[in-house]
Amino acid sequence: MRIQDYEPIVGRGTIEELRLLAARLTGKVIQNVNSTFVGGGVAEILSHMVPLFTQLGVDARWNIITGSEEFFQVTKKFHNALHGRAEKISSQDFAVFLETSERNIKESALYGDILFIHDPQPIALVRRKKDLGRKWVWRCHIDVSRPNKEIWDFLWDFVIQYDVAVFSAPSFAQQLPIRQVLISPSIDPLSDKNRELPAETINSVLNKYEIDSERPIITQVSRFDYLKDPVGVIQAFELVRKAMDCQLVLAGGTASDDPESEKVLAEVKEKAEGNPDIHILLLPHNSALEINALQWASTVVVQKSLKEGFALTVSEALWKAKPVVASAVGGIPLQVKHKFTGLLSHGVEGTAYAIKQLLSNPQYARWLGENGREHVRRNFLITRHLKDYLLLFISLDHPGEVIYL
Amino acid sequence: MGQWFTHIAQNWSNLAVPLILLLASLVIGLSTRRFAYLVLIRWARRKKREEGKIVARIVKTPLLIWWLLLGSYLAVQVSELSSQWTALAGQALGSILVISLAFTGIALATRLLQFYLGGGRAVSQTISLVVNVIQGTILLIALLLLLNIWGVPTIPIIVILGAVILAIALAVRGIAPDFLSGLQLNTESKIKLGDYIKLDSGEEGYVTEITWRSTQIEAAEGNTIIIPHSKLMRSAVTNYGRPPKQAKEPFHFRTRLHLKELTGLKASNLRELVDRLKKVPDSVVYYHTHHFLEEHHYLTPEPPNDFSGWVSDVLGDEVLEERLASIDTFEFPTIGALRARVIGVIEEHLAKGQDLRTAPEGQEFYFIKSVSVILPTPYVAHDLREFLEVLRKITIHSLYFHIFEAKLRLQRGLNDFSIWLEDSLEEKELAEEIARLDPYTYTLETLRAKLIELAEERLAEERLR
């Protein structure tokens, strides 16, 4: 995508402001580091943002660390533990993490003027700060509102070495001696996952998966992960189905750094077995167009997560002006303002109730959907995300609450 | 000499008639000339047609010449000159007639074209070109007539000229629409040098030059835009007229973008909310009473502050929510004063012994502060018209900065627009009108529309003066 392609969506003034900000970073190299180039929200957003930074004239680059299967299983445990889930983490796990981190510290080329480190996997790279200097930013994409204390205390020693920590929602803020910035993630409205699709494309996807386009469709799009509560969604759907004719679509894939997905998928299939109205779709990594089509085709979109970093799928659905029912966790309340841009729920029964409300009142559903789309245009598109990162990078050299450039 | 007198005395009857004819033509010519001149002048005055006066002045002298030529011709015909001399005299008189007609025609065409197309003012390039073409055509026709009179074959010349004219016509056919459109624009005189115009396709600026093909305008950013006349004719053009008065100092538009910083502080009930509110920096209070303007302005024009929203959505206290929502942010000159009012309302509510409700886990009130980054934009206004045009283009962030941030957070007491309008442009009334607006009762886009409306009204008043 080209940066000027966003002008019809966000307006010329927004793009002009991005260029004004980018000009202030001339000569600086922004080095992004995370754990994988494919799979998951972080890789997806970086794959869109790094080229756009470059088009704006910012020298932005992207590298990954390396690690064994064992290392990624340990970091997955860290991930779950930070989300507040009970995890048994042994001293051996910490040892694997530190050993792999030490190797990455020695072998990684860290050349950026600003080192932008994403999530816990590469967090230890900050140990190089003593000899390299530069500015270090830790970008946390996880819901750490109720982190496992042991893991958080372990990571805290690394976090406080950074100049700034970035979180996705206010409730993720911690007691830290360093600056903490709130930057919500975003969607790319021109990507295959979000652009408008012709009816033929949407229908072809529905036909492929034998989903009836004539009946209401309830959809949740997420990785097959316990924290997304796909079984809870099925339970809510079954409550709705008792009163109203509809179908459920659970569509998702896996991330290369998430070994648990297969287990979750098997449980979901078992729960849905024998019900012709439930469609479980395991989609590969390059299914952006199909996910897009499923969201466009949906009558109601659900995101019944138990824990979330941000839940980009919610913004994807809102962008398509779909009425959304979502849990009030993580970054979801920033996207779904209850009764204005969607409906928030707190359990299986609440989710079922909200879905029934929307299926029974299509006008209200449409009003919510349109508000949701406008809310995303103003606050959760990639251009706003670019702006926030540019402001963050600029603020690293300008302390104070009012910065005059 | 004596022989001359003898010759005249012997042939006086042969000379008398031609002389009488000559004298008669002179007398008639003088009378006709005076009569025609007076008739035309009176007609022009009665009908208020300036062109009548133009014609009268131009043909006054040629009219006498033409009568003299007629008289001379008749005199030659009745004289006893040989046929050879008679023919020669006829050719000479014919040549003089053609030349005088040509010059009279050129003078008439030039003056009348200037009158109809240029309104009597300095002519534009288009009119000059048309006049030159007509002058050339008349001279060409006169030349052909002269050649014909003296027996030079003109058919080959006409054929060659026809071919040349065809070739020229084919070469210029592409620019003919621009030329003809320019002619029509000159006739209508709707656009003049120095006018500020705006096309429906977006180009706008001051008219700096009008050529026979195009009009050049200088835009606010300093660019020169060349607009072919054919495009100008096809477009809806708004002409704002001459430049309005210039400001003592130009207005440099800035924009303000902000970063949200988490303080790590939170409150789960009203007591904690008040305790934290007393200690957090102004930037926190500012964020929670203003961020809604930019992020949710499409939902409602009246921004509920975050405190009232949290009290309602999470604590379920509608009475306190109403009291907090009705705090009129506009009346406070400083954030400190606003903070004191919010604290006062909550403490008053607590003093009534209301239940101290607690927010569920994860739904506490999280204190966030706003870090403003203010940067210049390329937009500068030197007068009210440029100010208006930039108002249409700036982002809501720029508008927000000059209206809200300047007044409250930077404590300038007034919004930036009112300060500039009064101090630099001496537009006191407009400045006060804008200062009186309560911006918190508008969405940012409806506020922009209101400012544009006020500026347009003021400009319209200026144009009528």
Image (cartoon, coloured by chain):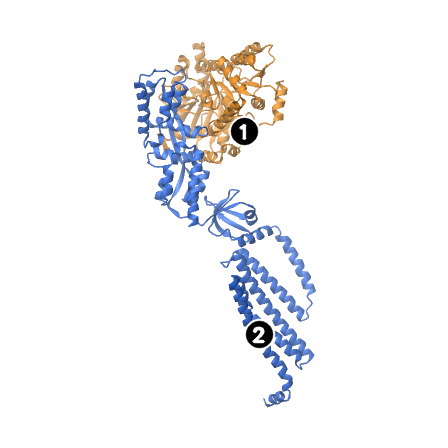
Furthest toward the left, the residue is B351
Horizontal relation, residue B140 to residue B34: left or right: right
Q: Secondary structure at mark 2?
A: helix
Q: Is residue A125 visible?
A: yes
Give x and y (percent) for residue A250: 56, 16
Disc 2 to disc 1, C-alpha distance: 86 Å
Q: Is residue B386 above or below residue B395?
A: below
Q: Which label sits in the foreground, 2 or 1?
A: 2
Q: Is residue B369 visible?
A: no
Residue drawn 35% across the image and 24% down it: B323
Give x and y (percent) for residue B35: 55, 71
Residue B7: which disc? none
Residue drawn 61% across the image and 20% down it: A214
Q: Chain of mark 2?
A: B
Question: Label 1: which residue?
Answer: A190
Image quarter of the N terminus of chain B: bottom right
Q: Amino acid at mark 1?
A: Leu
Question: Label 2: which residue?
Answer: B29
The hue used for chain B is blue
Q: Is residue B183 above or below residue B96?
A: above
Q: Secondary structure at mark 1?
A: loop
Q: Is residue B413 above or below residue B34?
A: above
Q: Chain of mark 1?
A: A
Q: Amino acid at mark 2?
A: Gly
Give x and y (percent) for residue A223: 53, 17
Furthest toward the front, the residue is B46
The hue used for chain A is orange
Instruction: Between residue B313 and residue B387, name the one nearer to us.
Output: B313
Q: Quadrant of residue B165?
A: bottom right
Q: Are marks 2 and 1 in contact (CB under 8 Å)?
A: no
Instruction: Between residue A133 and residue A367, name the one nearer to us.
Output: A367
The residue carrying pointer 2 sits among few (fewer than 14), some (14 to 19) or many (20 or more) residues within 10 Å by Cα, namely many
